[in-house]
Image: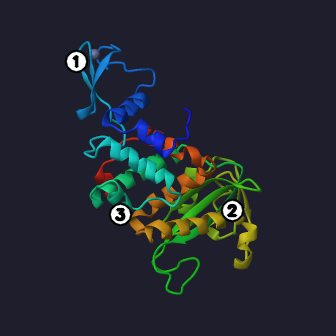
Amino acid sequence: MSYTELSLLEFQRRFSTEEACQAALEQARWPEGFVCPRCGHRKASRIATRRLLQCSACHHQASVTAGTIFHKTRTPLVKWFWAIWMVAQDKGGTSAMRLSKQLELGYRTAWTMLHKLRKAMAQRDAHYTLTGSIEMDDAYFGGQAAGKRGRGAANKTPAVVMVESRGEYAGFLAIKTVTTVDKQQVDAAASAKIAPGQHIHTDGLNAYNGLEALGHDHHAEIVPPNQAHEKLPWVHIAIANAKRFLLGTYHGVSHKYLQAYLDEYCYRFNRRSWEPTLTSRLLTACLVAKPITLAELMA
Ligand SMILES: [Zn+2]
């Protein structure tokens, strides 16, 4: 799949009508052209008002949005496409308030759309695992610090942060929220995001003691707080930037949705050198993402 750089005017030209947006969905769903699931016929007519393609031979109606995050949405596809544009263009992310004003949507609708976009981002990154030299540490997000700092600060949600260290630059980043930073949850996060047999650097907290048993080469080094930035530089930069991201647009985030916002942050971080094509990439992520219901989002 190739990703293109889309200017605002180009985007507007391409996706200005429901029909044009539906055509983009059709293209993603049937890259080789429509094939009727019932009779195999290759010609169909478009019913844009109902987001359907109707087979010209047997009149079977195939949904264009089934199996995507746009499934059963009552919001016009044009607004969805603009939401993708706004989210991709704004480095700091877009708030539901801003989206609702810009696209003339109810706040609740805008909020739900943004969370569906975050799910599409998370599904995209779920395909990747980290390899090579990896820095791993825990961080505490959200809540009121109330003078308490570091591990176990009140009202904060802990997370395990993993980032590939490529020396002069950082590679892929993954962040998993946990209920407590213990061996079991660190092992689960590592198993989910790190390919077997990698080199992992930590500060030697007991919770990281299981990494060796998982088959990794574990370099544990007790790091005094004032040297943390030198010993594990990339993981600390990633944590500091994630905190800034959460505060900047979202003014702090509740525990319940923290993972979703961190998924958005990781998606952006992992594509930071592909920024010009981010709109095109996010559009593709949405077209190939599995559907998600409001009930699943709220769970
Ligand atoms: Zn047919």
Q: Give the image location of residue 294, x and y in percent.
A: 29, 52
Image-based side of 168 in relation to 96, left or right: right
Residue located at (63% from left, 47% from top)? 195
Quadrant including the C terminus: bottom left
**Residue drawn at 67 percent across, 51 percent down:** 215
For numbered disc 1, what is the local secondary structure? Answer: loop
Q: Earlier in the sequence, mark 1 or mark 2?
A: 1
Disc number for residue 164: none
| Circle number at residue 59 | 1
Q: Secondary structure at mark 3?
A: helix
Q: Secondary structure at mark 2?
A: helix
Where on the image, by quarter, is ligand 1? top left
Which numbered disc flags the more N-terminal residue, 2 or 3? Answer: 3
Q: Earlier in the sequence, mark 1 or mark 3?
A: 1
Q: Nearer the viewer, residue 79 or 198?
A: 79
The image quadrant where one finds the N terminus is top right
Contact flag, marks 1 and 3 (Cβ < 8 Å)? no
Q: With 271 as the anchor, is 230 left or right in this view?
A: right
Q: Which mark is residue 234?
A: 2
Q: Quadrant of residue 28?
A: top left
Relative placement, left or right, of 216 versus 241 is right
Which mark, residue 97?
3
x, y percent for residue 211: 65, 58
For label 2, being within 8 Å of ligand 1 is answered no
Q: In 3D space, how far apart are the residues under numbered discs 1 and 3 (Cα atoms)?
A: 42 Å
Q: Nearer the viewer, residue 11 or 126?
A: 11
Report crowding for label 2: few under 14, some 14 to 19, many 20 or more residues within 10 A (C-alpha): many
Label 1 lies in ligand 1 vicinity (Cβ under 8 Å) = yes
Crowd rating for badge 3 (residues with CA inside 10 Å; few <14, some 14–19, many 20+) = some
CA–CA distance between discs 1 and 2?
A: 57 Å
